[in-house]
Each structure stands twice: as C-alpha cells, then as structure tokens.
Image (cartoon, rainbow, N blue to C red):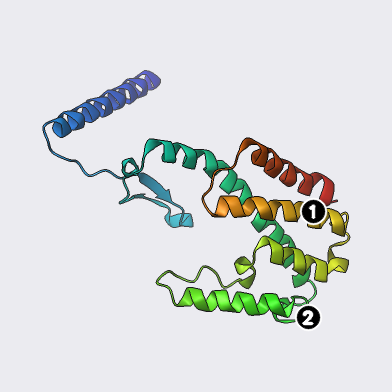
Amino acid sequence: MKNKTFLNRFKLFGINNLMLESNFRNIEKDGMKLEKGEIREVNLGKHSKLRKSPVDKSFFEEDIRNKAKKMSEFYELYYSIENTIRRLISEKLDKLDSNWWKSEYVPQGIIDEVEKRVEDEKSESMEVRSEDLLTYTNFGELIKIIEKNWQEFSDTLRSRDSMKKVLGQLNKIRNVIAHSCELNEDDITRFELAIRDWFLRVQT
C-alpha cells in the first residue's frame, strides 16, 4: 500500500513538472523572457549544494555545445592521467625529502618557470589554484622531473624510453584539448591507447 502511494505521488510530481514546463513555454510565447540557468551541484564535501549558474547555454550555438559535450569526456581523461602522474611523483619524492621541490630533485629551470607562473597568477583576479607547486607543471616538465630522478621510479616504470614516448604522446594531445580544439578520430585513438599503454606497458 505504501509503495502504491509513493508511486502515485511520484507520478503526480512528474505530471506537475510537465504542466509547469508547459506553462513556462506559454508565458514565453506571450513575450515574457524567463531567466534561464543551469542548476549545478557544487561539491563542497559535507556542504555540497545546488546552485544556479548565471550562464544560459542557449547563448552558444548548438553545434559548438555538441562538440563541447563530446570533448568533455576526453578532458576528464586528460585531467585524470596528468594528475595521476603528478601524484606518483609526489609519492615517490616525498619519501626522499618532505621539501623535495626546492632541492636537487627538480631542475632549476622548472622551479624558475613555476615561480613565474605563480607570480603571474597572483596578479590576476582569480584565486591561486593550489599551494602544491607541482600543479603548475606541464607534461613536458613532469617528464624531466622523472628523468632526473629515474632511480626512484625505475621500480615502478618499466623503462625510461617507454615513459618518455607515452608522456610525449600525451603532451601533444594535451595541447589540442587544453586549447579547446576538437580531437579527430585518429587523435582520439592515439590518446586512449597512450593512456592504456601508461598503465599496461609503462607502469609495472
């Protein structure tokens, strides 16, 4: 009986929503523009909440939105693999020195470049992205850090050459994704194979 009552209420909820949508469309047909915005969940741990985005996606042309949806999957992969590699570096070098960043473990050129990026970011209106300076590095710099400390990674990564080859490939594809360009089918295949190779052929 309770299940039937719940089901009826759920159906009623759905019907009410459809009626509301229909009413809103009729209001807009009469000339009144209703404010639109996407409802998003903001992940704040225990304080996660829903917020209304001030951006109406209909501002953008449909073909651009469709390409963005397609590319969002590959951005997730790119974000995940890059931060997986950063975490591996942190875990390895933390065991050697808790202050490994400003030491012989990181090439001085990378330290200087990262400090410049941090200072540039401080001059902008956005918040500083992280206190972890490794987050300011790119794929090319991650390769150099691993190379400089190869002895510490040799028990986890199969060979220096395979590491450089796979990360080099990922770095090329990263540039396409980071500049909001669309990957063609060949690049998608290369990207997915490079990620697979990292876990199956590079990491032991």
Callout count: 2
Q: Nearer the viewer, residue 34 or 19?
A: 34
Image-quadrant location for residue 133: bottom right
Q: Name the residue under label 2.
A: 104
The three-letter amino acid code for the residue at tag 2 is Glu
Question: In which quadrant is the N terminus drawn?
Answer: top left
Left/right of residue 26 with respect to residue 112 in the rendered view: left
First in sequence, mark 1 or 2: give its number: 2
Discs 1, 2 touching: Cβ within 8 Å:
no
Q: In which quarter of the image is residue 153?
A: bottom right
Residue 166's place in the image compared with 8, above or below, is below
In this view of the protein, which residue sits in the foreground, 155 or 105? 105
Say few, some or many: other residues with alpha carbon within 10 Å of mark 2 (under 14 / 14 to 19 / 20 or more): few
**Closer to the camera: disc 1 or disc 2?**
1
Residue hosting label 1: 165
Counting from the top left corner in percent of width and height, residue 46 is at: 46, 55
Regarding residue 153, the answer to whether it shows in the image is: yes
* Residue 93 position in % (x across, y down): 77, 70
Q: How many other residues sit within 10 Å of disc 1, few (<14), some (14-19) or many (≥20)?
A: some
Where in the figure is residue 193, as x and y percent of width and height? 74, 41
Q: Residue at x 57, y 50 (%)?
A: 177
SS state under label 1: helix
